[in-house]
Image: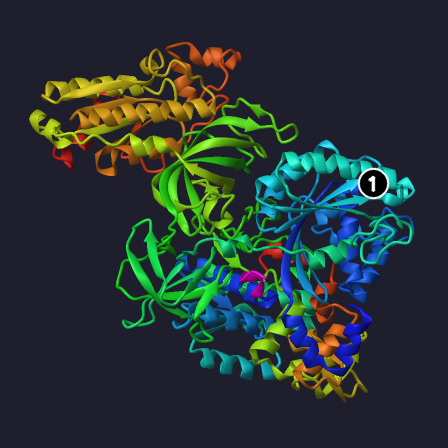
Amino acid sequence: MSVTTNELLATDVVAYLEAHERKSLLRFITCGSVDDGKSTLIGRLLYESKLVFEDHLAALEADSKKVGTQGGDLDFALLVDGLAAEREQGITIDVAYRFFATERRKFIVADTPGHEQYTRNMVTGASTAQLAVVIVDARKGVLTQTRRHSYLVSLLGIRHVVLAVNKLDLVDYSRDVFDQIEAAYRAFAAEIAIDDVVVIPISALRGDNVVEPSARTPWYTGPTFMEHLETVEIDDEVAEQPFRMPVQWVNRPDLDFRGFSGQIVGGVVRAGDRIRVVPGGHESTVARIVTFDGDLAEAVAGQSVTITLADEIDVSRGDVLVAATDPAAVADQFEAHVIWMSEEEMLPGRRCLVKLGTTVVGGTIDHPKYQINVNTFERIAAKTLALNEIGVCNVYLDRPVPFDPYRVNRDMGGFIVIDRLTNATVGAGLLHFALRRAGNVHWQAIEVDRSAHAGLKGQRPAVVWFTGISGAGKSTVANIVERKLHAAGRHTYLIDGDNLRHGLNRDLGFTTADRVENVRRTAEVAALMVDAGLIVLVSLISPYRAERQLARERIGDDDFIEVFVDTPLEVAEARDRKGLYAKARRGELPNFTGIDSPYEPPEAPDVHIRTDEVDPEHAADLVVEQLMSDRQR
Amino acid sequence: MTTTSRLTHLQRLEAESIHIMREAVAESERPVMLYSVGKDSGVMLHLARKAFFPSKPPFPLLHVDTTWKFKAMYEFRDRMAAEAGMDLLVYQNPECVRLGINPFDHGSQVHTDMWKTEGLKQALDFYGFDAAFGGARRDEEKSRAKERIFSVRSPQHRWDPKQQRPELWRVYNVRRNKGETLRVFPLSNWTELDVWQYIHHEQIPIVPLYLAAPRPVVERDGTLIMVDDDRMPLAPGEEPQLRSVRFRTLGCYPLTGAIESTAATLTDVIREMLLTTTSERQGRVIDHDASASMEKKKQEGYF
């Protein structure tokens, strides 16, 4: 805080407050490794903006002596280290948010680590940032990691970059060194479409050009680091975009008021504007823009408001109010960048949840078309994505959602991927465009439909899904069930997992990803047969709950019977009719369910058969009973 | 100048907090707002009234009481809840009531653990809340700087700093597994200065204890403690003195240090705060226990 502030404070605190209430907000991210002096730079910014209090400073002095790396000097990096475990390791392992303010601006800094586990954290930090500070060590120049950080910054849609060439004191404040680094970086930035780059020579440790211009760099005439942050024009492009407001909450205090609450993520809205509700497509006119502080004539991107419409049309959470003259596109299939954030690798084709704006929708992510090497930007062939990997994938959603391309509007094109079982956030994605494929391949209306097929056969079709480990007796029981149904005049078909692997699924192995795909295809085949009016028996290990759930959803809950053929592993292994367990134990069959690949037993199967307690004939009766009794087949 | 640069930092913070509250409410069965009567709670309550206007905030206020708050806080609490037209639930850990847990006989750590940490967990379980708003800010303390805005707690209310969900854009993952609850921090990105500026700008009422007045205090271990009632045991010869003091944070009166001040108006307080050189939480006796104490408390279920 400068002298003027203190004077103003002393004389007229109200004037001071009014001046400070007009401050703008800048959110930025800092990228660099531990060694680049990133924490030192942030620590210094906090220190210089007088946001470090005496008690913190006392703690800092004590810590500097105890664990500091700067001899007796203050180790500013210690100001920004967070959790206890990290302090001991000396690295930050997550995104930490720091705050400081000057006369002109309030700043929110997303501080992310620079070591190898960077991508997930950096992407998170960059998602809300308007500007990125990329830090390089003057002795080392533009490194692979500099390129990596800059690529991620560009991918996440940040258009303003400050390259802080740090540790200039260690190269004797050499102009040549600085010029070379600047030239190298500018050439590179142009390649990855970052157009606003400002390069500043600093020493975070000594304070050169951080807040005050340094006498040791007379050749540098540009702004100091802080000066630039305070004055950089962040042209808010979203305000120039067409109006967009995802509806968060329907506001109904009484029968007379029905408003739609949300935060505007694009453009401007005025009372009287014509809007469309997407994905539905109804149009109306904005009647009022309601806030606690009174109605507004207009509201802009960034504001949280409640909008009422002139017409009574159906609007609910997840819908987006958009400018009728320039509405958002609606689609259910996209190409997207996907950034994987989970320790468990992505399983292409597995059902997941996608949250885009305020919409949560089920869907699947396909095999990556390619993965991106974030160091070389090369496209690499990949079957899946592991933690911190980025790929381009098709995304298929259960229903159409409104969107804008990510580069046009982050809030309308950025989504998270949620695991359906753990509810963890396992990935993030950037939508680019809708796939034309589904749009052009229309469903053929078929006159002889499922009920017509079934009617002729005089039965209600169904899928009986036998799941269990190898050797549990699935096929044995399924065979008997089919025999009994056949004898009773039912039209049936038995799909055996092993048999499918000789044909339709012969390209698939036994990795988790392949197993997921194996079950998906089998479920699709079963669904076609159900359409044809058949009672389909599926005998398949199908080890994962998520895929069995997918099969259930694909067929429909009413016509899906899950039969858990339950045998203790020891019993199945003792039987070992095909000699597979012995091979697996010898290590000749990797990814064998029950040995080195997990089996997730059903939590609530429709029929539970303990084959070590019930003989196969009796077990089959239980299944037939279940199929016939409550379903009038 | 583009249209949005007309939005000030306070307007942006306000809009963000409102967005957070609406997300939490839209995707929760039984949300609740933790109301601690302090200035941050006051700002949070004010934002809640804005977020759902013209509806009343669709959740109750919950005060996890210790029976040791300042008298002025109780009066203020009841008045604010009535003004907002919201239900106020007051929860006191019955075991603490039975054992008469207090900071003098049992020490600050036991007192805080049992009344606040245990009390909060009990209250959330008792009412079956699945989401609770808290007024914590990331600038208060280093471990908070890394906590998410939507923080998932295990069925035992524990926080696992290693299992946090990444938060991108303003897309919050609000989903919970069975038994899990959410702590939601709408003020995460506010600083102490933002809070005071907002209180000033919006004229939000605050407990008078934040303003300087002559109050009876005793000095213990360099901390000024206000003698708010006759439950406070005095050492032989210890005599409360009337000194002009105010409080930077509010909690249990025996555990809350006062600072000497003559700042009797809101603007004086802000001036003093801006010129001050010690951080806000320093007045809280509980934070002094251990360097990583807050992180440990949070893992155990403290807000």
Against B173, residue A511 (above or below) is above
Q: Quadrant of the N terminus of chain B?
A: bottom right
Total labels: the figure holds: 1
Q: Magenta includes A268?
A: no
What residue is drawn where x is 58% and y is 71%?
Answer: B99
In the displayed structure, does residue A633 sit left or right of residue B140?
left
Q: Amino acid at mark 1?
A: Phe
Along the viewing direction, whichever of A609 and B242 lies nearer the viewer = B242
The image shows residue A102 at horizontal and vertical percentages of 72, 64
> Which residue in the protein does label 1 denote?
A178
Chain containing mark 1: A
Disc 1: CA contacts within 10 A as few (<14), some (14-19) or many (>=20)? many
Against A75, residue A113 (above or below) is above
Which residues fall within the magenta stretch?
B1-7
In the displayed structure, does residue A391 sit left or right of residue A146?
left
What residue is drawn where x is 44% and y is 47%?
Answer: A356
Along the viewing direction, whichever of A538 and B100 lies nearer the viewer = A538
The image shows residue B225 at horizontal and vertical percentages of 73, 79
The image shows residue A166 at horizontal and vertical percentages of 81, 44
**Residue A609 at least partly seen:** yes
Where residue B271 sits, quadrant-wise, is bottom right
The image shows residue A514 at horizontal and vertical percentages of 43, 22
Where residue A213 sits, quadrant-wise, is bottom right
Against B206, residue A327 (above or below) is above
**Residue A138 at least partly seen:** no
Against A69, residue A299 (above or below) is below
Along the viewing direction, whichever of A256 and A436 lies nearer the viewer = A436
Label 1 residue SS: helix
